[in-house]
Image (spheres, helix red, strand yellow):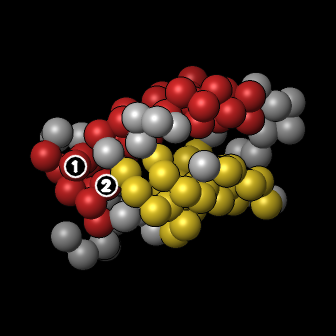
């Protein structure tokens, strides 16, 4: 899995699963420790090829880090199977909060 920072968009590629979770977490911790961390970060999942339940845990950790640093965080192009796992675990609203006026 590679994470490429492009302005305020972090584009993830490859698998986001048990095999990559610890490396992704370490890489994201380094990113979060930057002095020039943007006020709003968008994480793009369009190039993610596979996910498992560890991906849900990563998204929750990223939400926690964003709150801790007082930053806004958006996830875009979330794979349907990742959203299904989040709904199954009862944390979908934490991962992808409803926006006013958004369709259910």
Q: Position of residue 17 (x, y in %)?
A: 41, 42
Q: Which mark is residue 72?
A: none
Name the outermost residue toward the front: 19
Rendered view: 95 above or below 65: below
Q: Nearer the viewer, residue 15 or 77?
A: 15
For the residues labelled 2 and 1, say whether their Cβ atoms are less than 8 Å apart.
yes
Q: Is residue 35 above or below residue 97?
A: above
For the point 79% across and 60% down, which residue is it? 6
Q: Which mark is residue 85?
A: 1
Residue 22 in view, yes or no: yes
Residue 101 to residue 51: above or below: below
Q: Quadrant of residue 82?
A: bottom left
**Number of the label disc, if any, that sits on residue 82:** 2
Q: Residues within 10 Å of mark 1 (few under 14, many from 20)?
A: some
Left or right of 43? Residue 60 is left
- Is 86 displayed left or right of 75 in the figure? left
Q: Quadrant of residue 12?
A: bottom right
Report crowding for label 2: few under 14, some 14 to 19, many 20 or more residues within 10 A (C-alpha).
Answer: many
Task: Point out residue 57 in the picture as x, y percentages from the top left corner.
Answer: 37, 33
Q: How many marks?
A: 2
Q: Secondary structure at mark 2?
A: helix
Q: Is residue 42 visible?
A: no
Q: Residue at x 68, y 50 (%)?
A: 3
**Residue visible at 19% across and 70% down in the picture:** 104
In the rendered structure, the answer to whether residue 14 lies left or right of residue 38 reads left
User: Foreground: 71 or 57?
Assistant: 57
Cα distance in 3D space between marks 2 and 1: 5 Å
Q: Give residue 45's position: percent from left, percent from top.
A: 51, 61
Which residue corresponds to the image point at 24% horizontal and 75% vertical from the top-left? 103
Tag 1's secondary structure?
A: helix
Q: Position of residue 93 (x, y in %)?
A: 27, 47
């Amino acid at each position: 899995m590679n994470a490429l920072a492009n302005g305020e968009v972090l584009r993830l590629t490859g698998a986001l699963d048990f095999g990559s979770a610890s490396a992704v977490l370490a890489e994201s911790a380094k990113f979060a420790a930057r002095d020039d961390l943007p006020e709003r970060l968008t994480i793009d999942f369009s190039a993610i090829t596979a996910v498992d339940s560890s991906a849900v845990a990563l998204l929750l950790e990223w939400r926690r880090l964003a709150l801790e640093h007082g930053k806004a965080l958006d996830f875009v192009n979330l794979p349907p199977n990742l959203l299904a796992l989040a709904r199954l675990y009862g944390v979908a609203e934490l991962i992808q909060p409803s926006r006013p006026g958004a369709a259910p």
